[in-house]
Image (tube, helix red, strand yellow):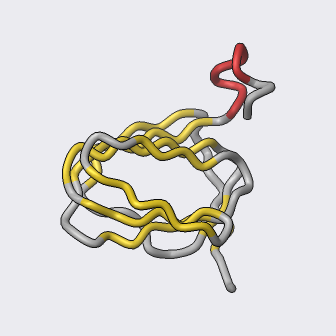
Amino acid sequence: MSYKIEKRRRAFSAEIIDELLPVPHIHSHVELIYLKKGKSVAVLDNHQYVMQEGDFFIAFPNQLHYYLDEEPVEGYMFIFEPDVFRELKNVF
């Protein structure tokens, strides 16, 4: 499978989302999604996870991931370098 390597410049970003990226990608940041409405399938390292209203999803650094929206979505996306939360560095 081909994928995009993302080079992120900011240590932390937060955004309101109305769609999720269907392109397989990888980056050195942690990606955290909170789905407020809708339904999507998160694909992480070839495993599929159904996300519905109220669910959180996390992709750790250097994990191949992408999303397949099955319904219109609304939510929040947080992307950050593992060093932003030094207390959790061993987790990431």
Task: State which quadrant residue 5 falls in.
Answer: bottom right
Q: Is residue 82 above or below residue 40?
A: above
Q: Residue at x 36, y 43 (%)?
A: 55
Q: In x, y percent, where is residue 12?
A: 53, 33
Left or right: where 51 falls relative to 42: left
Q: Residue furthest top?
A: 87
Q: In x, y percent, where is residue 3?
A: 65, 77
Q: Residue furthest right?
A: 90
Give the mark count: 0
Q: Is residue 74 above or below residue 70?
A: above
Q: In x, y percent, where is residue 40?
A: 34, 64
Left or right: where 37 falls relative to 50: left
Task: State which quadrant residue 38 falls in.
Answer: bottom left
Left or right: where 74 falls relative to 55: left
Along the viewing direction, whichever of 25 and 91 lies nearer the viewer: 91
Along the viewing direction, whichever of 78 and 51 lies nearer the viewer: 51
Quadrant of the frame with the N terminus? bottom right
Q: In x, y percent, where is residue 24?
A: 57, 73
Along the viewing direction, whichever of 13 and 24 lies nearer the viewer: 24
Q: Is residue 7 above or below residue 92?
A: below
Quadrant of the frame with the C terminus? top right
Q: Residue at x 32, y 70 (%)?
A: 69
Q: Is residue 64 above or below residue 79?
A: below
Q: Residue at x 42, y 41 (%)?
A: 56
Q: Residue at x 37, y 63 (%)?
A: 20
